[in-house]
Image (cartoon, rainbow, N blue to C red):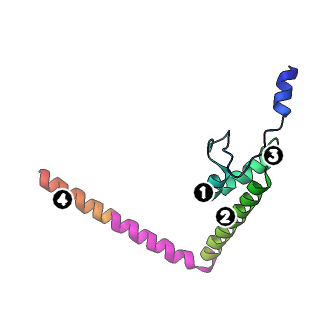
Amino acid sequence: MDKLMNTTTERAPALGLTTPLTFGKYQGLTVESVAKFDPAYLLWIKQNVTRLEWADDALAYAKKAWSRDYRQKMDRQNAWAWGFGRDARDARDRQTMKRLRIEIEENARHRRQHD
């Protein structure tokens, strides 16, 4: 029992910028890689995995990614609030409708060829 208790309270080695994660959904990827596409996951690790030590370079890089991610989210929210997002959404919807029309036409053409 003491051995089990000892392993759960032991601190893991410091998590560096190029250290691969040994747990979770991004197991095997480095902090640097994860920060590029999901910095919120690193924030979750920082807040919830208390036994994990962070190397200074990894922590600084993750904080930079968090602030960049936060700024981008706020920019998107502000764009919607000021009405700029509506134009982007409308353009996306037009593109989607165009792709659907093309797909329907291609399917109809394909059916006519095989009938």
Residue type highlighted by circle 4: Arg
Q: What percent of the width, then of the height, locates residue 95? A: 39, 69
Identified at 79% across, 49% down, the residue is: 54
Q: Which of the 4 image quarters holds residue 50?
A: top right
Label the magenta part by its dominant secondary structure.
Answer: helix
Label 4 residue SS: helix
Residue type highlighted by circle 1: Phe
Mark earlier in primary sequence (3, 4): 3
Q: Is residue 99 left or right of residue 8?
A: left
Label placed on residue 53: 3
Identified at 65% across, 75% down, the residue is: 78
The span shown in magenta is: 81-99
Mark earlier in primary sequence (3, 1): 1
Residue type highlighted by circle 3: Glu
Real-space CA distance between mark 1 and mark 2, rounded to the nearest whole angstrom: 9 Å
Q: Nearer the viewer, residue 47 or 56?
A: 56
Q: Is residue 106 left or right of residue 34?
A: left
Real-space CA distance between mark 3 and mark 1, rounded to the nearest whole angstrom: 22 Å
Q: Nearer the viewer, residue 102 or 5?
A: 5
Residue type highlighted by circle 2: Asp
Label 3 residue SS: loop
Q: Residues within 10 Å of mark 3 (few under 14, many from 20)?
A: some
- Is residue 73 one of those drawn in magenta? no
Name above or below for residue 111 compared with residue 6. below
Q: Nearer the viewer, mark 2 or mark 4?
A: 2
